Amino acid sequence: MPTIPAQGNVPTPSGFIAQSAQGQAILNWNPTPVATTYYINRSTDGVTFTTIGQTAALQYIDATGTLNTIYYYQIVSATATASAVPTVALPAQSLKPGQTTLGNMRLESQQRSDLLNSGNVTTQEWNSMIAQSYKELYDILVQKFGNDYFVQVPYSYTTTGTIDPVYQANVYPLPNDFYKLLRCEVALNPQDPNSWITLRKFEAIQANLWNYPNVYTFYGITNLRYRLWGSNLQIVPISQGGQTLRIWYVPRPNQLIQDSDIVDGISGYEEYIVADVCIKALVKQESFEQAQAFALQKAAMLKRVEEAAENRDIGSPETVSDSRRRNFAWGDPSDGGGYGAV
């Protein structure tokens, strides 16, 4: 931006809104008297700003940012000889397809429920309602077993060969963001990525069924079993020290706090969140008839999510799996089934 002295006769733009969008950040503001142009400043830390463009319009689209990088934006109104004090810096980011943000969700929910300028629902309340509705959608998607919409990086353990003095069992703490288990594995050879063996779960009543020395052979035969136990992973029998275990799991949903926090709507599924938030907000306003209309939209959206999300891999949908020859030989008779047991 050219060096133009800031003077009081050029007002700062009002109504500045920064929105995150697919592949771009969209900035809007209200017209400023006497201003002939508007400069757009951008920063990665909210402190040091660089001018990235100018326009005579009341909107600017920044498509030059790195995906999912939060930028802070200011708008400066100016004439040929003077400029205003910059607006308050607002965050926005370029999003991947299917993503939106807490700030976008709040604005859409306010607009859809006609409560944009209502003071009866605070920003904190809007954010809380969105966070709860997001967790509800998250659970729906997680329950579509086999589609794995949310999978965390595998979490690994090295066995100690000893028992925990408190629990009096062979236990290992689950990661802090653990939500649901996908599978538990043990490595025959940690250096060989093809040596992982999937472990089977034991029922609580079976905890002492395998209390004999840990079987562990080159052929992938092992009597190790796992079970989720509170905030721990329990292994029976007591494993040999130095073995490598890992779990694949679904993490807990992100806590939505900042306006820039990302909500992954996958394929427009965030519409479910908007409908649910509008219901909550309108019920608080005692606008029950309007809330009922959104309840119908939510039901329709739920049907769509359940039908569309079920088969993520449409080329190879889920089938009944053969569980034979896992860990032990044919049938795994330790489960009480003999040959052919599953």
Image (cartoon, rainbow, N blue to C red):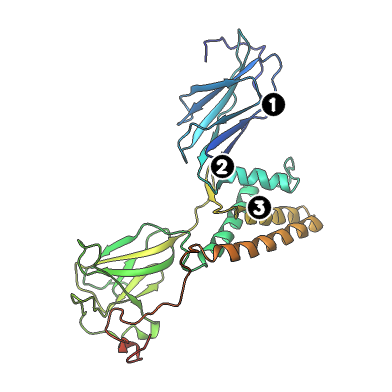
Left or right of 219: which side holds 83? right
Dot in front, 2 or 3: 3
User: First in sequence: mark 2 or mark 3?
Assistant: 2
Q: Residue at x 60, y 52 (%)?
A: 268
Tags 2 and 3 touching, CB below 8 Å: no
Label 2 sits on residue? 259
Left or right of 33: which side holds 205? left
Residue 247 figure quarter: bottom left
> Given the image, on which type of amino acid does mark 3 rest?
Val
> Given the image, on which type of amino acid does mark 2 rest?
Asp
> Given the image, on which type of amino acid does mark 1 rest?
Asn
Label 3 sits on residue? 274
Query: Marks 2/3: CA distance?
Result: 15 Å
Tags 1 and 3 touching, CB below 8 Å: no
**Pointer 3: residues within 10 angstroms few (<14), some, or many (20+)?**
many
Q: Confirm whether residue 132 shows in the render.
A: yes
